[in-house]
Amino acid sequence: MTSTRTAVVTGSTSGIGLAIAHGLAAEGCNIVVNSFSDRPGDHAIAESVAREHGVGALYVQADMSKADQCRTLVTRAAKEFGSVDILVNNAGIQHVAPVEEFPTEKWDAIVAINLTSAFHTSAAAIPLMKTAGWGRIVNIASAHGLVASPFKSAYVAAKHGIMGFTKTVALEVARSGITCNAVCPGYVLTPLVEAQIPDQMKAHNMDRDTVIREVMLAKQPTKQFVTVDQIAAAVSFLCSENAAQINGTHISVDGGWTAE
Ligand code: NAD
C-alpha cells in the first residue's frame, strides 16, 4: 500500500476479523477494531494492534445489528483518522435449526448483522472514498454465499444476499477508484470452531483428527481447515494496488468445497 490508509474491520475482536485487522496493520494501515461490547479487553486489542505494527488503532463499540451504530462506526473512524479507505464487513453470527423451527429473532439478527450492516457501513463509507478517489470494500461472505447446507437458512440467505450486494456496489463505484469484492471462506479454525472439537469427539467417539476430517470437514475436499491468516492474506491482496481491476467478484478460500 502506497500511503497510510485507514481500515475499518467490523467484528474484529476475534477470529477472522482480528486476523484481517493484523494483516492490514502489517501493511501499514491505521485500524478501527469493532465489536458490540465495551470491555477493557476490547480496547486492549486495538492497543496491541497499534503496538505490534506501529500504526494508529482505535476500538469503537458499535452493534452491527443497529443501523445508526453501523453508520456511526464509519463517521467515528473518519473523525479519528481523517478518512475511511478500506471497509471490511466481517461481523457475522450463525444459528442452526430447521426452517419451520427457526426463531424469528435469530433470523432477524442474522440478516441484520451478516447482511444489512454492510449496506449501512458501505453507504456511510462510499462518499468518503469517492472524495478520496480511492477505496476498497471487502465483504466476508462464505462458501454459504455460493452453496447451501440444511438448517442454516438465515445464514445462507444473508450470505447469498451479500454476494448480490457486492456485485451491485461494485458496478456503482467502478469509475470512482473504488472496488467492492467478497471473500468466501470454507471452514476456518477460529476459536469458536476449535471449542466445538472436544464435544464432537465425545459425541462421535472419535479422535480429534477423525472428527476434523470426517465430521467438521466433510464438505471440504482438502480435509484441512482454512486458517485465519489465509483469509487475511486474501483480504490484503484485494486491498492492494494490484487488485485495482478486480471488482464485483469473490475469492473462494475453501479448500475446493464449492468446486464440487
Ligand atoms: P467469530 O465469532 O470468531 O467473530 C465474529 C466477530 O463478530 C467477533 O468479533 C464478534 O464480537 C463480532 N460480532 C458479533 N456480533 C456483532 C455485532 N452485533 N456487532 C458487532 N460485532 C459483532 O467468527 P468468525 O468465525 O471469525 O467469523 C467472521 C466472519 O467470517 C463472519 O461473517 C462469518 O460468517 C464468516 N465466516 C466464518 C467461517 C468459519 O468457519 N469460521 C466460514 C465462513 C465465513
Image (tube, rainbow, N blue to C red):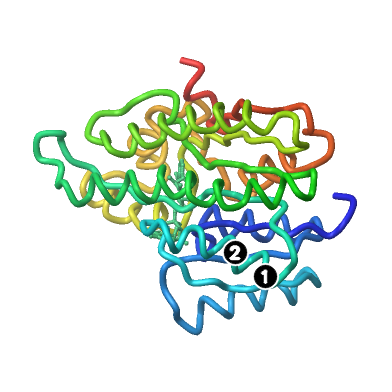
Q: CA distance from mark 1 to mark 2?
A: 6 Å
Q: Is residue 75 above or below residue 143?
A: below
Report the label total: 2
Camera-side residue of 57 and 135: 135
Camera-side residue of 214 and 176: 176
Give the residue displayed 44% in from the left and 78% down from the top. Answer: 38
- Kindly identify which residue carries mark 1: 79
- Kindly identify which residue carries mark 2: 75
Instruction: Name the disc covering residue 188, or none.
Output: none
Q: Is residue 180 above or below residue 188?
A: above
Q: In the structure shown, which secondary structural element does the residue marked by tag 2 occupy?
A: helix
Camera-side residue of 103 and 22: 103
Q: Are marks 1 and 2 in contact (CB under 8 Å)?
A: yes
- Asked if disc 1 is less than 8 Å from ligand 1, the answer is no
In the picture as drawn, the residue positioned furthest to the right comes out as 2
Q: Which x, y percent locates residue 240?
A: 79, 42
In the picture as drawn, the residue positioned furthest to the top comes out as 260
Q: Which x, y percent locates residue 117?
A: 44, 50
